[in-house]
Image (cartoon, rainbow, N blue to C red):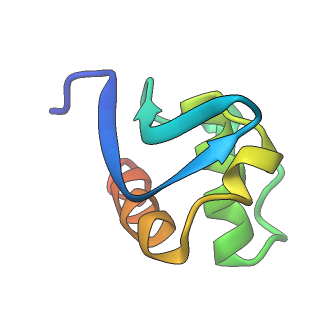
Amino acid sequence: MADFPIDIQLEDPFEFGSERVEKITIARKPTVRDIRGIGNLSPTDQSIKILEKVAGITPAMVDRISLTDFGRISERVASFL
């Protein structure tokens, strides 16, 4: 069982506003509420929506994550489902 929060270091840090983002923190496991209503989305969009909820980040921030980092983060989030 994972202890939370879980910090995932980014291979490709990025600037978001005046902040340099070097890690994404998964604060908790996804809940049923988190996945409600995402069934009609593509698998990628499902991962994005869940990530926004469990990490407390905005869609604009998710858009800045590299594909490499997003793949790693998505695998971690999916491991809880």
Q: Position of residue 30 (x, y in %)?
A: 52, 36
Image quadrant where one finds the N terminus:
top left
**46 or 6: nearer the eye?**
6
In terms of image quadrants, where is residue 75?
bottom left
How many discs appear? Answer: 0
* Coordinates of residue 74 in the picture (x, y in percent): 46, 62
Taking depth in this image into account, of 18 and 34 the one nearest to the observer is: 18
- Name the residue located 42 percent from the left edge and 41 percent from the top edge: 22
Q: Residue furthest left?
A: 1
Quarter-of-image position of residue 44: bottom right
Is residue 36 at least partly visible in the picture? no
Identify the residue at image location x=84%, y=70%: 40
Residue 49, placed above or below residue 52: below
- Tell me: residue 5, above or below residue 23: above
User: Image height check: is 26 above or below 4?
Assistant: below
Q: Is residue 34 visible?
A: yes
- Give the residue drawn at x 66%, y 34%: 53
Task: Work out whether 48 lies above or below 43.
Answer: above
- Which residue occupies the extreme front position in the image? 18
- Is 9 placed left or right of 24 in the picture? left
Q: Nearer the viewer, residue 56 or 3?
A: 56
Q: Residue at x 43, y 51 (%)?
A: 77
